[in-house]
Image (spheres, rainbow, N blue to C red):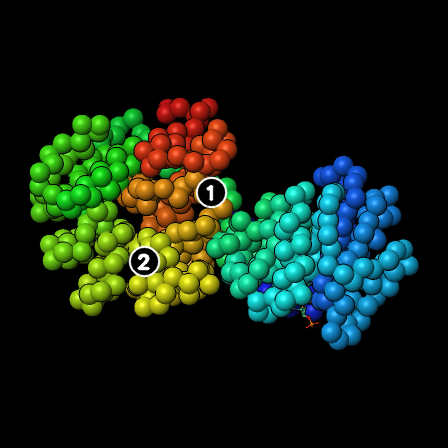
């Protein structure tokens, strides 16, 4: 897992190395130029520099690219007050070429965005907006330095306009905002250039990025039977929403849970013709089975019967995953919130941003403005493991640092994907993974199934939740894995 550092911590690191030689700004500019020269054919490059040190990085990058024989055009916004390091960078470039102070109009080649980095303090002003829009109009490659201008590096929020880069070369250490909320859409592919600095071991990361499969299920023993892998129940499926519970049940089954019961509130359905292995029962019957874990919420509805079903699941002594309407009911009913804090077994909440907002008594915008904070606040308020869905899903639990999931893409924005995710988590918990491990692995596999599907469907249109289940099952059974002994 890759550590991700906050702006405050990065400032501390920068101060510690303030006297480094060459200066960090020079290293950033040269490092960026070397990376660009190694990854693109020589072409015209328009370097756009802002009024802070991000602009300084850009100016050293311009000088270095010029030295490598690239045709370089520089546009810069002058700073409002004197900044010695920036002034030195400007001087270095002015020995080579001209500085244009008008808004760039780029027609070809590559653009380097050095307008703003971690110094963004609010929505960009009118001048910056014009320059950002000019960069975004460019149809060729855009390389952002440190952070795409306008993106909050801590949170991935965009308070106004932001550059949409194809690549971001981020300096010293990785930043959470590049991977969650709007970060993925604006940063493009991220490369971290450490500038030859090792981050001090005593500096705590703000979060970790899960960029590769974080763990695996233990191999299956010969001497095992279906009970070894748990009996689980999905509780939900009110009239008109039975599909949600069925999808969660199918996902749990296909991800290895031994026995899967689907406790439906709609008593008219007794059988899943596409997955006859599922045992379709009433909620009451499902809850009397000797269960290993439960998921409640897919298609649960918000009737009195739904409240009773949720209350019954919370009174069990097994891990419970609460999703969808289960979360909406929890947000509304204080007695359900009390039951959660009194449970002896783990409880896992898997909200999307709107559900998280209801649980926190705020709005979706506030949740999205700081997803790491929202997830941690939920986990401490409810004393639960949390998976906050959305681009760059956050997983956390009390006493554990948050992680940002690095897999997934917009193809997964389709009906039933949340139900599938609940079923995967349920299966992993039933097979013995602790809640937070189950969340991280489930989020990663779910996203990766979407990424693999997208390789064959580049526009990302039409991925169904059922396709995703099949993809996750393939990922759980990789080819060439050492066979059971
Ligand atoms: N930290 C590190 O380890 C390293 C840092 N390095 C680099 O330094 C960068 C940080 O530099 P930074 O602090 O000067 O901030 P940065 O983003 O360039 O711009 C801030 C300036 O922009 C302006 N401004 C801000 N918001 C605005 C708004 N909404 N609307 C309009 N203007 C706005 C404001 O300008 P002012 O008002 O002061 O004229 C402010 O001063 C960092 O991202 C990295 O690239 C590397 O060199 C080496 C390692
Ligand atoms: K930038």
Quick check: marks 1 and 2 in contact, CB under 8 Å? no
Instruction: Please state the horizontal and vertical placement of residue 24, each as a whole percent of the image.
Output: 75, 60
Query: Residue visible at 74% across and 65% down?
Result: 77
Dot placed on the residue nearer the N-terminal end, 1 or 2: 2
| Residues at marks 1 and 2, CA–CA distance in whole angstroms | 20 Å
Ligand 1 is located in which of the four quadrants? bottom right
- Whether 283 is drawn above or below 377: the answer is above
In the picture as drawn, the residue positioned furthest to the bottom comes out as: 81
Instruction: Please state the horizontal and vertical placement of residue 485, each as a whole percent of the image.
Output: 37, 24
Query: Residue visible at 26% across and 57% down?
Result: 327
Query: Taking the image as drawn, is residue 210 in sight?
Result: yes
Instruction: Please state the horizontal and vertical placement of residue 394, each as a whole percent of the image.
Output: 43, 54
Instruction: Please state the horizontal and vertical placement of residue 89, each as a whole percent of the image.
Output: 82, 62
User: Mark 1 = which residue?
Assistant: 409
For residue 239, what is the image quadrant? Answer: top left
User: Mark 2 = which residue?
Assistant: 355
- Label 1's element? loop
- Label 2's element? helix
Query: Residue visible at 79% across and 55% down?
Result: 74
Query: Taking the image as drawn, is residue 23 in sight?
Result: no
């Amino acid at each position: 897992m890759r550590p991700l550092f906050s702006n405050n911590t990065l400032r501390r690191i920068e101060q510690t190395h303030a006297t480094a030689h060459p200066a960090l700004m020079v290293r950033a500019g040269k490092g960026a130029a070397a990376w660009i020269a190694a990854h693109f054919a020589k072409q015209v490059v328009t370097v756009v520099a802002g009024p802070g040190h991000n602009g300084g990085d850009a100016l050293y990058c311009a000088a270095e690219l010029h030295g490598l024989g690239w045709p370089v055009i520089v546009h810069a916004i002058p700073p409002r007050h004197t900044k010695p390091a920036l002034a030195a960078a400007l001087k270095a470039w002015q020995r080579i070429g001209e500085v244009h102070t008008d808004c760039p109009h780029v027609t070809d080649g590559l653009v380097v965005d050095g307008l703003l980095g971690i110094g963004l303090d609010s929505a960009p002003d009118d001048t910056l907006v014009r320059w950002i829009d000019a960069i975004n109009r460019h149809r060729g490659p855009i390389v952002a330095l440190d952070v795409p201008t306008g993106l909050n590096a801590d949170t991935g929020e965009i308070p106004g306009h932001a550059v949409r880069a194809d690549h971001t070369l981020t300096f010293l250490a990785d930043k959470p905002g590049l991977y969650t909320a709007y970060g993925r859409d604006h940063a493009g592919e991220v490369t971290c250039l450490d500038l030859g600095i090792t981050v001090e071991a005593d500096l705590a990361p703000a979060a970790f990025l899960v960029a590769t499969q974080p763990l695996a299920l233990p191999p299956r023993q010969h001497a095992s039977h279906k009970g070894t892998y748990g009996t689980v129940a999905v509780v939900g499926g009110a009239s008109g929403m039975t599909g949600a519970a069925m999808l969660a049940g199918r996902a749990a089954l296909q991800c290895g849970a031994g026995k899967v019961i689907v406790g439906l509130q709609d008593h008219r359905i007794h059988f899943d013709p596409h997955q006859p292995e599922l045992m379709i029962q009433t909620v009451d019957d499902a809850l009397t089975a000797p269960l290993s874990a439960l998921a409640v919420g897919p298609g649960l509805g918000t009737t009195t019967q739904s409240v009773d079903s949720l209350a019954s699941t919370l009174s069990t002594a097994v891990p419970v995953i609460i999703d969808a309407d289960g979360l909406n009911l929890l947000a509304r009913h204080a007695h359900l919130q009390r039951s959660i804090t009194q449970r002896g077994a783990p409880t896992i909440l898997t909200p999307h941003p709107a559900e998280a907002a209801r649980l926190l008594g705020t709005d979706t915008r506030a949740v999205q403005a700081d997803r790491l904070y929202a997830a941690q606040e939920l986990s401490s308020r409810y004393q639960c493991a949390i998976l906050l869905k959305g681009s760059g899903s956050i997983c956390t639990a009390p006493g554990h640092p948050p992680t940002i999931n690095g897999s997934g893409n917009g193809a997964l924005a389709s009906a039933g994907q949340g139900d599938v995710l609940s079923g995967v988590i349920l299966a992993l918990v039933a097979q013995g993974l602790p809640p937070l491990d189950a969340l991280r692995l489930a989020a990663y596999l779910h996203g990766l199934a979407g990424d693999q599907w997208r390789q064959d469907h580049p526009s990302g249109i039409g991925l169904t939740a059922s396709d995703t289940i099949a993809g996750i099952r393939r990922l759980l059974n990789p080819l060439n894995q050492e066979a059971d002994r």
